[in-house]
Image: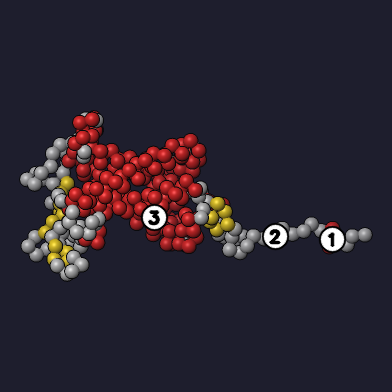
């Protein structure tokens, strides 16, 4: 006759206190992520060197030295300046007027540590920029196709109607501000702020930055003159290109901050190996 102890159902083994490891990112996502990290790094820095050749931005069909820019980065005899419209800001030591690695004072828009090459070389910067543009466009198109064909865009990135409710978005903003990150199974899904950010980059900033880049090419203007009409001229395309680049910089800074705050080891491991450790839900 079996004892009472043997008749009682065995208790379920509780999950490890640290949480369980799960597959969070597919290989295609991880490869595209790290390729994009390298590509955007080189393109942003080489783009800043290209900007140094004419550190002014305009709206309209044309833009030249005697036209009125909406943005310029330059220097007076004693200070570095950034001027937006009629507002002027002193940026000595960072933008407009700074010292190179040898301690020599320079008066170019962006400093040597922010550009590729680190010395003034417009032709070299263009070669870096155009070479890595292929690494942005071709894998990006392939990732787009994979996202739609596999259902990743619809399943993981597209916001649901309930998530777009102002109350839901505001709650997510407050949770992030208080560093209350999702736990349990919720950590495997993108929240609404992530969805909006990723969709803005994938389907907004990146396509715009590619199309405006093409608009600045005389050869592409001859082949596709509709680009000039679409963006209101090469000067406007250059302004939009610059603003999109700054939008990407903002996204990268916020993204890195969230990685550090959410736990860099777990987050970076998930983007290298695909494995992510789920933190147990509160009270579990």
Q: Quadrant of the N terminus?
A: bottom right
Q: Which residue is mark 2?
A: 13
> Most extreme residue toward the bottom, as rendered?
103
Residue 164 visible in this rendered orientation of the protein = yes
Between disc 2 and disc 3, whose residue precedes? Answer: 2
In the picture, the disc for residue 6 is 1
Residue 229 visible in this rendered orientation of the protein = no
In the structure shown, which secondary structural element does the residue marked by tag 1 occupy?
A: helix
> In the image, is residue 47 above or below residue 92?
above
Which residue is located at x 21 percent, y 51 percent? 124
Quadrant of the image occupied by residue 284: bottom right
Question: Residue 153: image x %, image y %?
Answer: 46, 40
216, 13: nearer the viewer? 216
> Most extreme residue toward the right, as rendered?
1
Q: CA distance from mark 2 to mark 1?
A: 17 Å
Q: CA distance from mark 2 to mark 3?
A: 36 Å
In the structure shown, which secondary structural element does the residue marked by tag 2 occupy?
A: loop
38, 94: nearer the viewer? 38
Q: Residues within 10 Å of mark 3 (few under 14, many from 20)?
A: few
240, 4: nearer the viewer? 240
Q: Residues within 10 Å of mark 1 (few under 14, many from 20)?
A: few
Which residue is located at x 17 percent, y 41 percent? 235
Q: CA distance from mark 3 to mark 1?
A: 53 Å
In the picture, the disc for residue 255 is 3
């Amino acid at each position: 006759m079996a004892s009472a102890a043997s008749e009682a159902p065995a208790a379920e083994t509780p999950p490890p206190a640290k949480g369980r490891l799960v597959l969070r990112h597919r290989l295609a996502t991880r490869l595209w992520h790290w390729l994009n990290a390298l590509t955007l790094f080189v393109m942003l820095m080489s783009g800043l060197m290209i900007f140094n050749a004419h550190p002014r931005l305009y709206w309209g069909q044309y833009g030249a030295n005697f036209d009125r820019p909406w943005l310029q980065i330059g220097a007076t005899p004693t200070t570095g300046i950034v001027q937006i419209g009629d507002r002027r800001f002193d940026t000595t030591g960072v933008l407009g007027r700074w010292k190179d690695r040898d301690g020599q004072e320079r008066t170019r828009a962006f400093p040597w540590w922010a550009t590729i090459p680190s010395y003034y070389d417009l032709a070299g910067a263009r070669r870096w920029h155009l070479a890595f543009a292929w690494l942005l466009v071709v894998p990006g198109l392939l990732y787009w196709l994979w996202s739609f064909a596999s259902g990743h865009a619809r399943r993981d990135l597209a916001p649901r109607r309930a998530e777009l409710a102002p109350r839901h978005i505001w709650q997510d903003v407050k949770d992030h501000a208080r560093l209350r990150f999702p736990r349990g199974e919720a950590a495997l899904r993108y929240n609404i702020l992530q969805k909006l950010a990723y969709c803005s980059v994938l389907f907004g900033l990146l396509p715009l930055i590619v199309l405006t880049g093409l608009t600045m090419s005389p050869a592409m203007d001859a082949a596709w003159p509709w680009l000039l009409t679409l963006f209101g001229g090469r000067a406007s395309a250059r302004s939009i290109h610059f603003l999109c680049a700054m939008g990407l910089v903002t996204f990268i800074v916020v993204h890195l901050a969230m990685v550090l705050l959410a736990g860099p080891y777990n987050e970076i491991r998930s983007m290298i190996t695909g494995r992510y450790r789920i933190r147990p839900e509160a009270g579990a």
